[in-house]
Image (cartoon, rainbow, N blue to C red):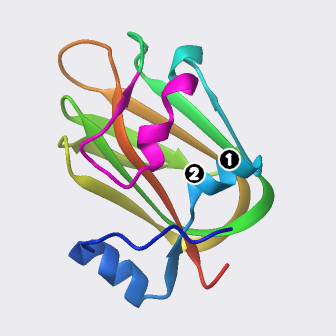
Amino acid sequence: MHRPPAPAVIEPAEQELLDQGRVRVDLAAARASGALRIDANDPLFLGRLDPLFDGDPETMARTESINPLQLTLTFDQPLRLAVVRVVLAGSPYDWHVEPVAGGERHILRGVPERVYSPIPLPETVETSQIRFEFRRLERDDYVHVSELELWSEGVE
């Protein structure tokens, strides 16, 4: 995996991940190279993915009245996944990640909008397919995703 460029300002939670030896996976580069395929239950959402990987929590992609949004990331090569972070917008959300297809779900409930919400895995897992579900809890059924980050163990 490629390392993304360092942001101009590193927020404290990101600095803590870096200090722990975690590496943010460059999902934009993996997608551009064909090493990452993304599937969703909203086909129109697939044409709006760039904001998820641009490092800017103020940009976003949204579904067309599809709630919950289900995403599956499939990599050509496995990675050692340690932490997943997302930023969601528009209302509070419940979301979960299934780091290994068919494996255990890790759930966060009632996550406020516009904050990085992390799920550190109890153990680093080697995986090539990761599933997500984002459920908007209030207002309409348009799911807004601003950022999606995967953090791996060690240097890639």
Query: SS class of the residue under badge 1?
Result: helix
Residue 63 screen position, x and y as percent: 42, 19
Q: Amino acid at mark 1?
A: Ala
Q: Quadrant of the C terminus?
A: bottom right
Q: Which stretch appears magenta?
A: 46-62
Q: Is residue 139 magenta?
A: no
Q: Which mark is residue 28?
A: 2
Name above or below for residue 155 compared with residue 75: below
Q: Which mark is residue 69?
A: none
Q: Which mark is residue 32?
A: 1
Residue at 53% in and 29% down: 70
Name above or below for residue 75 compared with residue 5: above
Q: Amino acid at mark 2?
A: Ala
User: Quadrant of residue 20 in the image?
Assistant: bottom left
Residue 66 screen position, x and y as percent: 43, 14
Q: 48 or 117, which lies in front? A: 48
Separation of disc 2 and disc 1 at Cα?
6 Å
Q: Quadrant of the N terminus?
A: bottom right
Query: SS class of the residue under badge 2?
Result: helix
Whether pointer 2 and pointer 1 mark residues with C-beta atoms closer than 8 Å, the reply is yes
Residue 11 screen position, x and y as percent: 23, 72
Residue at 57% in and 51% down: 28
Residue 57 screen position, x and y as percent: 28, 48
Using the rendered image of the protein, determine whether residue 100 is visible from the camera's viewpoint: no
Q: Please give the count of numbered marks on the rendered protein.
A: 2
Extreme residue in the right direction: 76
